[in-house]
Image (tube, helix red, strand yellow):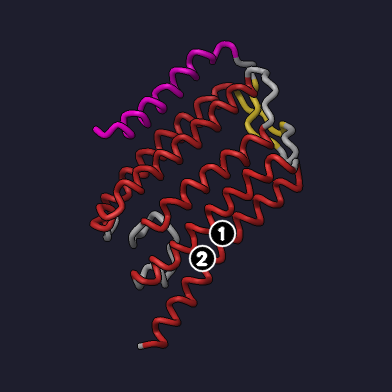
Amino acid sequence: MKKKNIFILTLIILSFIISFMFYNKLPNNIPIHWGINGEIDRYGPKYYIFLEPIILVFSYLLFKFLPKIDPRKHNYKKYEKSYENSIFAFVLFFFSMFILTLLASLGYNVPISKFVPFFVGVLFIILGNYLPKSRSNFYFGIKTPWTLSDDTVWRKTHRLGGKLFTITGVITLISTLLFNGTTLFSILITCLLISSLLPSIMSYIYFKNIENKK
């Protein structure tokens, strides 16, 4: 088993161990949702602390299982390292969210409205680095009818997507230092929308340009 997979499984097991260790110290109701300004606006039974470890398990299994049933599963071999690193990034992100939730549940004053955008920014920078290395498949990446129809369109779209994801991550990190609340949230959502929608739109344009040259 690869070292990264061992580390991921260790994090997953650790999340369950930590949940059991601190379960009796948790109040009957723990915070499960925060508003834009970082205020707790929803509580749930304390057994919800196990929800994120369970999400970790299912996310990891899903990431490992999907390539096996993908009609283009042979393409995963061409960017296996990048795919594995992306899984690693997602698991670290969810584990970080778990720790933040646990600390808040134990009564610590955790600035969720700062930490969550920060970790989202880090995640997008990592994904922005690996996205251009992906190859055509049905589960991971920017999947439009045009990227799935032409490998050149896939490559161009994911190069653009990688740059936009990285820019989004950097802007988000800087914004966590400069802004709070609604302003920070608005910047984050705007960047996420642009980095998600623009590559999809451009994939159609790339496709039409190739078609017109034939």
Identity of the amino acid at label 2?
A: Pro
Residue 181 percent across, percent down from the top left: 75, 42
159 left or right of 39?
Answer: left
Range covered by the magenta-colored residues: 1-25
Q: Quadrant of the C terminus?
A: bottom left
Q: CA distance from mark 2 to mark 1?
A: 7 Å
- The number of callouts visible is 2
Mark 2, secondary structure of its residue? helix
Which residue is identified by label 1?
A: 195
As rendered, which of 50 and 34 lies closer to the eye? 34
Image-quadrant location for residue 17: top left
77 left or right of 87?
Answer: left
Identity of the amino acid at label 1?
A: Ser
Which residue is identified by label 2?
A: 199
As rendered, which of 162 and 8 lies closer to the eye? 162
Residue 109 percent across, percent down from the top left: 70, 23
Image-quadrant location for residue 180: top right
Q: Is residue 115 magenta?
A: no
Residue 202 percent across, percent down from the top left: 51, 71
Question: Does the residue at mark 2 contact the one at mark 1 (Cβ under 8 Å)?
Answer: yes
Mark 1, secondary structure of its residue? helix
Above or below: residue 182 compared with residue 56 = below
Q: Which residue is at 41% across, 51% downward?
A: 130
Q: Magenta residues: mostly which secondary structure?
A: helix
Q: Which residue is at 34% across, 69% downward?
A: 151
As rendered, which of 164 and 92 lies closer to the eye? 164
Judge the density around disc 2: few (<14), some (14-19), many (≥20) Cα neighbours within 10 Å. many
Judge the density around disc 1: few (<14), some (14-19), many (≥20) Cα neighbours within 10 Å. many
Q: Is residue 8 magenta?
A: yes
